[in-house]
Amino acid sequence: MRTVKIQGGLGNQLFGLAFARSLTLATGAPVALDVASYRWDKFGMTFTIGEIADRIGGLTVVERPWLGNRLTSAAMRRAPFDLGLFTSETLPLPADFDFGVYAGRQGYFDGYWQHEAYILDGGAWSDLFGAFVSARAVADERDAVVLHYRTYKEENHPVFSRTPERDYFLDAIAAVERGSGRVSKLVLVSDDPELALDRLGDLGREIVIRGRRGWADDMALMLNARALILTNSSFSWWAGYCGRAGVVTYPTRRRLFHYPIPAGRFVRC
């Protein structure tokens, strides 16, 4: 049976789950989700989206510690041979990438799968995720212009903690105004709003701090936004990919370490 390693926070879990679903669609065969990595997660993350996996069908949750740990992953990625039973994600994808051929591989799949080419039938997947969020969120405002800022304050290495510089946000506001009209207010969603405000500085617009009511309420706000200004975050990425926003801005890579590949509908600034 094909096995997909699930790791990281909510956004990364969604990438892994969307990839596993695509494997089932492409092959018609069941797929296992290996959640053993959470035994050693340095940030205390847990697997939180099992209910979506149940709704998809064809997926089972397993724990395979001998494959799911970091040491095995690192060793297999650097192995000078290919047994055809361990597939590690490689980016950038080649121009002739064919998911059907890729899905034909067997064994263990280890990666973050942060590219929309790994997502088959994205519309149905977005509907599934939207329903999952709506069932957990309270009624919320619609049509806001939302700025999501992931601080990466928990990262102790300066390379890993890089976030977009202020110029990106000014360019993003201009792009939103070109695409959907004047922006007088930004609603800020962040893991640390005060720190985010300090880093953003004066953007020439009123910034309203989003109250901390949990991830589902934050995501519901973003899914229903008129426009989104995203940062280099997988949580950001899914709001832009699955949401109804008319304009979705996303930073160019520059020096950013955490960087899901932008979806085709994103406006890069």
Image (tube, helix red, strand yellow):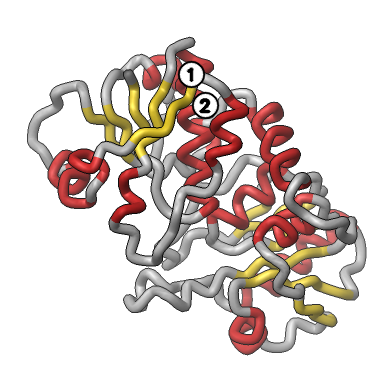
Please say if the residues under marks 1 and 2 sit with CB atoms less than 8 Å apart. yes
Where is residue 40 drawn, in percent x and y?
29, 57
Is residue 91 visible in the rendered structure shown here?
A: no
Residue found at x 43% / y 40%: 113
Q: Using the image, tell me which numbered label, if any, was put on residue 24.
A: 1
Residue found at x 50% / y 19%: 58
Is label 1 in a helix, a strand or a loop?
A: helix
Q: Using the image, tell me which numbered label, if any, was put on residue 21.
A: 2
Q: Is residue 225 depicted above or below 108 in this figure?
A: below
Horizontal side of 184 relative to 23 (left or right) equals right
Is label 2 in a helix, a strand or a loop?
A: helix
Looking at the rendered structure, the kind of residue marked 1 is Thr
Is residue 126 visible in the rendered structure shown here?
A: yes
Q: Is residue 75 depicted above or below 105 in this figure?
A: below
Horizontal side of 136 relative to 54 (left or right) equals right
Residue found at x 54% / y 32%: 53
State which quadrant residue 135 falls in. top right
